[in-house]
Image: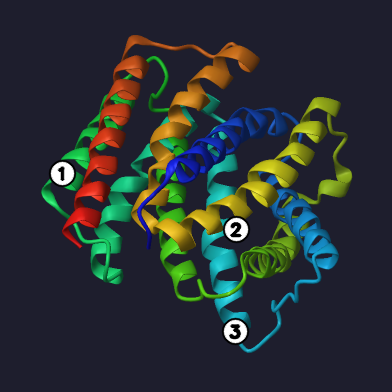
Amino acid sequence: MTSPKSIDYILLSVLSLIWASAFFNIKIATYSYGPLTIAFLRIFLGAVLIVILCYFKNIKIEAFSKDWYWFALIGFVNLVIPFFLIAYGVQKIQSNLAAILMSTTPLSSAILAHFFTKTEKINFTKIIGVIVGFLGIIILFSDNILINNENFFYALMILVGSTFYVIGGILTLKISKKKNENLTSSILIWGSLIIFPIAMYYEQPWNLTPRLDSTLSLIYLGIFPTGIAWLIRFHILKKNGLVFHSQVAYLIPIFGVILGYVFLKEVITFKVLIALFAVILGFYFVRRSIKQNLVSN
């Protein structure tokens, strides 16, 4: 793990913007498609894009090599489960809330990284950062205008999905020596294979008559937030580590609220703004803790 440079923070911001744009596009996709179908098509389209890239760059794809079980496990944990849970939750809550809820990722990331990595241990500043960010989520859940008894479970599922992202990130570190494009394509291939029969059996998408905007959003989701963003994500994970990467969750809600308002005219309450301030402050403390660790090491 190296000290983050300006280009690393730029990539982190780009990744945040792309992933933030996923939420309002998921919302639009749910107008016509079920959550399993959305998850499958996202993963499949992303896989097609990265496989084509590997072909032109003459990169060997090792999806069915001796490490196939790692690719399958990461594809299930890091793609299938969170993609389904996020799409499931966004059916009943605003897309900007889903983006904010993802800001819990650094909390579970900091805790799990402390136990499962050797270089990313918890320190006082990091604890302050993740607690402040999590307090923002508590404030958000107290907003009865946007989260109530009817959609509380859906919001909770998005929180669960964000935790699986972290677990998937830790698993990815086990095979981080593999080439970025190979790793990404192999995981996407296995994710597609796992979720395909499930989506076909339960949702039978061939019976749908989808809206054009839903279909365009789904295509966008496969190309950018899944394919291109995953390449950027694994690059950041391998170069800068899990906790630095987890800071993406503090930028996603900022972009998510802005994009949700611009494209879907979603409601922004006072508590949403307070929650945003909390996660931004948490982002500052977590970033500061990374710098402290690098100096001390």
Q: Mark 1: which secondary structure?
A: helix
Query: Residue 236: horizontal and vertical position, in percent?
Result: 49, 54
Of the image marks 3 and 1, the number of the one nearer the N terminus? 3
Q: Is residue 51 visible?
A: yes
Determine the image quadrant of residue 72: bottom right
Instruction: Residue under label 3, please give it.
Output: 67
In the rendering, at what x and y percent does residue 114 appear? 24, 63
Q: Residues within 10 Å of mark 1 (few under 14, many from 20)?
A: some
Numbered disc 2: secondary structure: helix
Please name the residue that numbered disc 1 is placed on. Answer: 125
List the single residue furthest toward the bottom.
Answer: 66
Mark 1 or mark 2, which has the lower sequence index?
2
Q: Secondary structure at mark 3?
A: loop
Mark 3 surroundings: few (<14), some (14-19) or many (≥20) residues within 10 A: few
The residue type indicated by label 2 comes to Val
Q: Is residue 151 visible?
A: no
Q: Residue at x 34, y 42 (%)?
A: 104
Can you tell which mark lies on residue 80?
2
Name the quadrant of the C terminus.
bottom left
